[in-house]
Image (tube, rainbow, N blue to C red):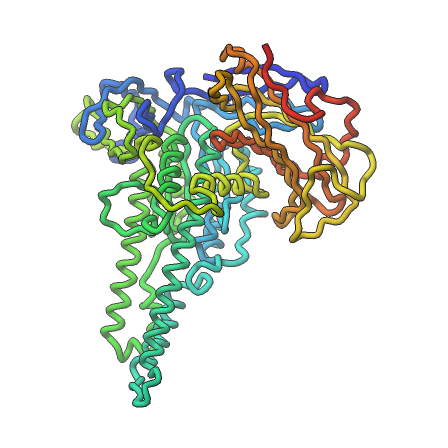
Amino acid sequence: MIRGRLAVMLAGATLSLVAHAQSPAGSPVLRSSTQLVVLDVVVQDQDGHPVRGLGPQNFRVTESGVAQTIGHVEEHTAQAAHAVVASPPEPPGIFTDYTPFDPHGTLNILLIDALNTPVKDQTFVRYELQQYVKHADPNTRIAMFGLANRLILLQGFTSDPAVLRGVVERKLIARSSSSLLPSGGESVTDQQRVSDRSNKVLSVAAPTSNGSPSALDLAANLREFQSELGAMETQLRAHYTLDAFNTLAHYLAAFPGRKNLIWFSGSFPLNVLPDPTSARPSEISTLDQTEFREMVNLFTKAEVAVYPIDARGLMTQPTFSAATLGSTVHANQVRRFDADLNKFSQSEAAEHAMMEDLATGTGGRAFYNINDLAEAVSSAIAAGADYYTLSYTPSNAKEDGAYRPIRVEVTGVDAARTLQLFYRRGYYANDASVPKPAQKPDPFAPSPEEGRALAYKHAAMSRGAPTPEDILFKVRVVPASATTETVTAPDNELSLSVPANGPFRRFDIDYISLSSELTFAQQPEGHRAAKVEFMAYVYDTEGRLLNATGKNVSIEAKTTDVAKLMRGIVRCHLELSVPDRAETFLRIGMRDVATNRFGVIEIPASSLSSLPPATDTPAAATGRPTPPQD
């Protein structure tokens, strides 16, 4: 159900601001809090076919072992999905961060992870995706993302197979492995050669008598150094992966319904399953626990099911390769050979266990030791297209931040049928009221909350990153004049690290949004106020910041009528100078400071250069946004 629609005027053009969906019951949903839990459940028979026609009487849900009263059950099927109705084309120079969607359909995300995948496996993934897009269902909505040291949007949601083919052909060209992968992306066999060299030194070394380090000591130190370096690189990759998942979860939370996140990776350093009883080791123990909980709750709120796919395909023991079997070390050290076999087996088992935990904990399915990755994508999309949405109010109303395990059972079905259920296995109760451990304040360092806010701002406003839709707004961007300038507009800040010499073309940027998109907090004086940050950045094609401008604005409502306040209009005007040279990109954002929610639009400057200069002066073009009036 659409939340609302309001026609507003900007420079003579009628703009429609469309809000996102509510819960099936029509009330606001807090999927990661104890007010309401929304759970997607995939029910399949033993052959993997969807089981349809179930109702509330067929489901039993327990939370922390206590039976819950299910308030709502809704069935979703692939056949019930409707075509997305595109919004009318905007007039030249008018842009919005709103993405049309089908509230009855399922969104699919292909995440190509170059951070954790060697280049040879990236090439294999690209080939398999080429096979998939040849036969992609035109009714399937897919977006594609790349993960390097940060998350990059390669293609927004589309159901056009031709567009997907273009992305796979032009954008998924593996160039290099991440510098954080062992030995720059070498295989286990390559790493084994390094270990072999250390073993060879150990086998012939003898201690010295003059007290200096022996070759034996140096070899042992080398092995310890390699081990410490590998652990550090893995932790860094886990941190980068966590940041990327947080950014992706923020982006996906704006869309209603289920999302299938299909993650291609050569290793999985991060497990989003927050099960404190799991005995399996995870790099998450070294990460920011608050950021991890935030990510888990965002995934819960966004209804994301993760389908990890091992980009390495069918794996074999590297110790049986021709290169390794030719090593004289293994010929002379059978014990070391056995140790290498055990190490590989344990590493592979741990990876697969991590994938299974990740999939099981979010309601997805893991795919590994298979070479047909195209079929794995098809299976993941098909499995996530038919599901049930259950909602209930937890009997335990405490918001204590504890992890709440969930168990779902299906009853009243033919006992001869063996059913498979896929659903999220738990969530963190809202921990806003839980006191945080006391820490010695650093007057020169931001608080952890400020640090996370700055990190998300950086991610949201980075060139090529997903464009959040937490706040819906429209913006008009047109040249301020037909000529260029040698100086920048007032309040513009040129980058100190990347020269951005003139001439510059100045652009007028005029925002418009609804008051209902912002958070108006009650003030001690009795009125309500919101804090908003407006930002406009210029980037080059390599993602380097060239110029920036922005305003921080406090909006005080002059009405006590909340309903009237929510119908108000917010405006702002910025002026941004863009270097008049090679291709550049404008990243325009709006942030609700109280909740750190963003709306972002990215525009190629080339799409603006042919627009005529503005001939009017919008009402809000002289400074601060217009607050709602009585």
The extreme bottom residue here reads 209
When asked about the image quadrant of residue 18, the answer is top right
State whether residue 209 is above or below residue 53. below
On the rendered structure, is 285 left or right of 173? left
Residue at the image position 55 percent from the left and 25 percent from the top = 472
Name the residue located 42 percent from the left edge and 22 percent from the top edge. 80
Q: Quadrant of the C terminus?
A: top right
Where does the image place residue 112, in percent across and percent down from the top left? Answer: 47, 47
Choose between 479 and 144: the one closer to the eye.
Answer: 479
Observer-nearest of 30 and 413 = 30
Q: Is residue 393 visible?
A: yes
Relative placement, left or right, of 441 versus 202 is: right
Q: Residue furthest right?
A: 483
Instruction: From the viewer's side, name the closer residue of 187 and 417.
Output: 187
For this view, does 601 lie left or right of residue 22? right
How many marks on residues? Answer: 0
Q: Position of residue 356 (x, y in %)?
A: 29, 45
Whole-percent x and y of residue 583? 70, 45
Q: Is residue 506 above or below residue 320?
A: above
The residue under the point 42% across, 53% down is 237
Q: Quadrant of the N terminus?
A: top left
Is residue 382 shown to the viewer in this render?
no
Instruction: Give me the residue at 62% from left, 21% from top.
Output: 88
Height in image: 214 above or below 225?
A: below
Pick out the residue farthest to the left.
415
| Residue 497 picture location, percent across and down | 65, 53
